[in-house]
Amino acid sequence: MFDFLQGYDLLGAFWVTVQLTVYSAIGSLVWGTLLAAMRVSPVPLMRGFGTAYVNIVRNIPLTVIIVFTSLGLFQTLGVTLGAERFTSINFRLAVLGLTAYTSAFVCEALRSGINTVPLGQVEAARAIGLGFPQILRLIVLPQAFRSVVGPLANVLIALTKNTTVAAAIGVAEAALLMREMIENEAQLILISTIFAVGFLCLTLPTGLFLGWVAKKVAVKR
């Protein structure tokens, strides 16, 4: 029943999906944290940029962003992100697009965590002479991250599923292979089930683990 799988690199496709998820998650966490810092910054220009970025990017379909990275950045502007091979360029562009999109949701999750930090702690930090960057780094963000492990886990799971959009620019991840297999094989239900189980194996353990982490590191109020 599964003989038709021998001609396809199923594990390789899911490995590309994992790589997309990991690199995009790291990038989204870094850029999303910076955006969250901008959104609570005392500098109006930074607050305005952070707010505009989040509101604009969250309302643009991910497919549009991914396609723009290929047609706009690569084919029009010649941006290659340091890669030479076409497959590597598309992979890096997909990571860039996923990072740009997902960071907006990371930012909002972190901002909700920042709002849970008692104002008295911030005022006390100001009273002893700490500046905004020190307050954010030493007091606010550590507590904010502990408060939003659960929401960040949901963002990570959504990111894992969103990697399928990278197939739109030819990245050889799971969704692209599934489309190829459906076109070549008369096994629609079986193929769909295999890939559904594959994504379930990626997302379910992640959700369970991060849910356990969230309970362990939760801030007691």
Image: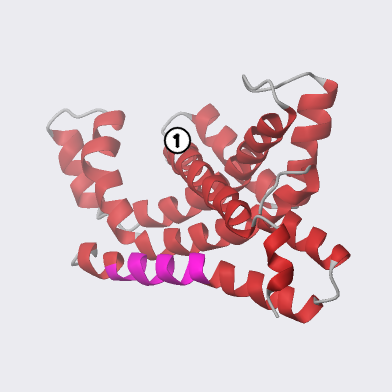
Image location (x, y in percent) of residue 214: 30, 66
Q: How is the image coloured?
A: secondary structure
Count of labels shown?
1
Quarter of the image for the C terminus: give it.
bottom left
In the image, is 86 to the left or to the right of 105? right
Image location (x, y in percent) of residue 147: 31, 60
Towards the viewer: 6 or 13: 6
Residue in the picture at 42% in, 57% down = 112
* Span of residues in magenta: 201-212
Q: Residues within 10 Å of mark 1 (few under 14, many from 20)?
A: some
Work out whether 125 lies above or below 208. Answer: above
Towards the viewer: 198 or 75: 198
Image location (x, y in percent) of residue 86: 74, 29
Towards the viewer: 165 or 134: 165
Whether 204 is among the magenta residues is yes
| Residue that badge 1 annotates | 34
Where disc 1 sits, the SS reads helix
In the image, is 88 to the left or to the right of 112? right
Q: Is residue 46 visible?
A: yes
Residue in the picture at 74% in, 43% down = 65
Quarter of the figure with residue 179: bottom right
Query: Please, what is the three-letter code of the amino acid marked with disc 1?
Result: Leu
In the image, is 175 to the left or to the right of 219? right
Q: Is residue 60 visible?
A: no
Towards the viewer: 91 or 181: 181
Quarter of the figure with residue 199: bottom right
Whether 28 is among the magenta residues is no
Work out whether 63 lies above or below 218. Answer: above
Quarter of the image for the N terminus: give it.
bottom right
Residue extending farthest left: 128
From the image, give the main secondary structure of the stretch colored magenta.
helix
Residue in the picture at 43% in, 58% down = 152
